[in-house]
Structure formats: C-alpha cells, structure tokens
Image: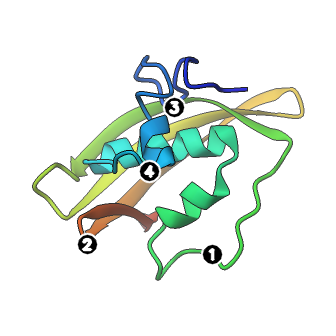
Amino acid sequence: MITDDSRCPCGLGEPYGVCCGRFRRGDATAPTAELLMRSRFSAFAVGDTAYLTKTWHPKTRPADLELDAGQRWTFLEILGKTGGGLLENEGTVEFRAHYRQDRRADSMHENSHFVRVDGQWHYVAPVR
C-alpha cells in the first residue's frame, strides 16, 4: 500500500504525498505533460480510476474504466519526450511502465500524446 510517506511510484524518488499525491488529491495540477504521465502511472499503481478518468481527454476517454486487480505497477521509465513544457499546449512522452502479473514481471512501452485543455494537461492516446 502506498502512503503519503512512501516513495512515489513515478520514479522521481520523492515521497508520494509531495510528488504525485498532490496532483491526485487536487492540491495542484501537473504543470507539464511528463509530470501528468508520472502522476497517471502513480494513479495506476494505487488504483485511482477517478484520477485517470479526470486526466483523460474527453474525446478519447473510455466510458468505463476498470483496472486489472491482478496487475501491480512497479516502476516507470521515461524514455523521451517532445514538447509538453510549461509554455506549450501539446506534447508526447515515451515511457516503459513495468508491472507484475501472476508473479511474472513484464512491461508496456508507449509514446503518449498529451494536450493542455483550459490550462490542464490531459492524456489523449498513444502516438500512432
């Protein structure tokens, strides 16, 4: 179980409460696409579907989001990014998300597209 004092699963090494937890609680919004990606990974790690839905672009958001209870997200690697900065409205973040399922380690690789809507970053979809 991840608490505010636990190391944040996003990989930055900060306590969860002052890292991605502040975004999830609504105390702040992610200022860059990369930080939104990290906070979304952390939301997968803690099972926070409300945050995942809230930060998913309305045009691509699924009607219902259910997470696999047998999948445990373990760590995140950011492999690259384009745009997505403080003064930009669009960007991509390439990452590898590691997880365990049925006692087997695995990972998923994606290059995600993000846009800023009304000052807040949203995940759109994988880059094709």
Compared to residue 64, the image places residue 21 above or below, namely above
SS assignment at label 3:
strand
Foreground mark, 4 or 3?
A: 4
Q: Which amino acid does label 1 sit on?
A: Pro
SS assignment at label 2:
loop
Q: Mark 4 points at which residue?
A: 26
Q: Name the residue under label 1.
A: 62
**Badge 2 vs badge 4, beta-carbon distance below 8 Å:** no
Q: Mark 2 points at which residue?
A: 118
Q: What residue type is labelled 2?
A: Asp
In percent of width and height, residue 27 lies at 39, 45
Q: What residue type is labelled 4?
A: Gly
Q: What residue type is labelled 3?
A: Leu
Foreground mark, 2 or 4?
A: 4
Compared to residue 48, the image places residue 11 above or below, namely above
- Mark 4 and mark 3: Cα distance apart in space: 22 Å
Q: Name the residue under label 3.
A: 76
Q: Is residue 42 left or right of residue 122?
A: right
The tag earlier along the polypeptide, 3 or 1, is 1
Colouring method of the image:
rainbow
Q: Which residue lies furthest to the right in this view?
A: 102
